[in-house]
Image (tube, rainbow, N blue to C red):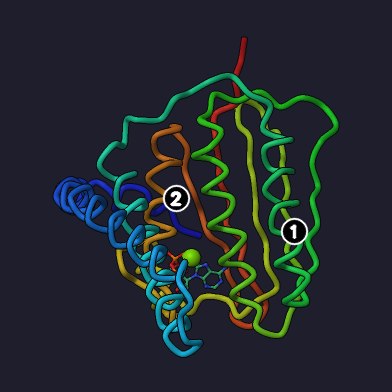
């Protein structure tokens, strides 16, 4: 197990710069997307249509990266409100259930029936759970199980996302959450960095438990709301 959040501090300056650049990239991307869509309105020969669709997909990919970087630019931009975390987690699990099934992954949710209040930015937290669960699915190329648990422990709420995937080798564990660290062909290595940033802005922490070829658990600890 390892706490990784402190490493994010070093990235703050880099993040600011990158996010500034990301902002500038957004406008030209929007017009590129618009014009590419116009090209599809006419009768286009199938081959060319396919190329334009690839262009659109790639624009979406760049857009996603840009959005990830924008989070870094506005680390304080979280809008904290008192919310029940359980339905928030539930929503993300249902959202990904279809994609999971296609990949022979079963999703399980273990959450208390009671209301678990925390101070959070719902949309940002959803993005975090989405990133972790997607990573879990991607860690199980032959299918498996994802178990998402919500536990209340004294003044804290622990949300754990456990997979039965490939695990993370010891030497890679240190690099988890660094920008652009990815072991995937189509990965960008931004998901975890952005997630850690969001968790940090909720005054939370993360620790990882992982065993090679057995699976990985990401544990997110957030302060519980106490009246
Ligand atoms: P990406 O998914 O684009 O690679 P992330 O920041 O989401 O970027 O993850 C970075 C890397 O961390 C992944 O490429 C993978 O090597 C590792 N990783 C993250 N989650 C898991 C997991 N559940 N099991 C195994 N490895 C993981
Ligand atoms: Mg990812």
Residue at x 42%, y 74% (from the top left corner):
187
Residue at x 43%, y 78% (from the top left corner):
54
Q: Nearer the viewer, residue 24 or 107?
A: 24
Q: Nearer the viewer, residue 103 or 226?
A: 103
Residue 102 on image: x %, y %: 75, 74
Q: Quadrant of the C terminus?
A: top right
Q: Considering only vertical position in the picture, is 63 above or below 81? A: below
Residue 66 on image: x %, y %: 31, 55
Residue 145 on image: x %, y %: 76, 69
Residue at x 17%, y 50% (from the top left corner):
24
Quarter of the image holding residue 177?
A: bottom left
Quarter of the image holding residue 71?
A: top left
Structural crowding at the residue carrying mark 2, measured as other residues with C-alpha within 10 Å and reported as few (<14), some (14–19) or many (≥20): many
Q: Considering only vertical position in the picture, is 16 above or below 222? A: below
Contact? badges 1 and 2 (CB < 8 Å): no
- Residue identifier under label 2: 195
Side (left or right) of 118 relative to 204: right
Residue 93 on image: x %, y %: 72, 52
Q: Residue most toward the right?
A: 113
Q: Secondary structure at mark 1?
A: strand
Q: Secondary structure at mark 2?
A: helix
Residue at x 70%, y 52% (from the top left corner):
95
Q: Earlier in the sequence, mark 1 or mark 2?
A: 1
Quarter of the image holding residue 48?
A: bottom left
- Residue identifier under label 1: 147
């Amino acid at each position: 197990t390892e706490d990784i959040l402190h490493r994010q501090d070093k990235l703050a300056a880099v993040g600011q710069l990158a996010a500034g650049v990301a902002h500038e990239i957004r406008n030209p991307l929007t017009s590129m997307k618009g014009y590419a869509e116009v090209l599809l309105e006419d009768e286009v020969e199938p081959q060319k249509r396919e190329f334009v669709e690839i262009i659109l997909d790639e624009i979406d990919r760049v857009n996603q990266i840009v959005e990830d970087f924008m989070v870094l630019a506005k680390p304080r931009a979280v809008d904290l409100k008192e919310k029940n975390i359980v339905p928030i987690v539930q929503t993300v699990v249902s959202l990904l259930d279809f994609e999971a099934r296609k990949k022979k992954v079963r999703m399980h949710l273990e959450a208390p029936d009671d209301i678990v209040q925390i101070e959070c930015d719902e949309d940002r937290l959803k993005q975090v759970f989405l990133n972790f669960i997607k990573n879990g699915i991607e860690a199980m190329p032959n299918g498996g199980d994802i178990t998402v648990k919500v536990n209340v422990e004294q003044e804290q709420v622990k949300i754990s996302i456990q997979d039965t995937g490939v695990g993370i080798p010891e030497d890679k564990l240190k690099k988890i959450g660094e920008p652009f660290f990815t072991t995937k062909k189509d990965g960008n290595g931004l998901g975890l960095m952005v997630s850690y940033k969001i968790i940090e802005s909720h005054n939370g922490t993360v620790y990882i438990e992982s065993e090679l070829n057995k699976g990985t658990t990401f544990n997110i600890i957030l302060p519980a709301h106490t009246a």
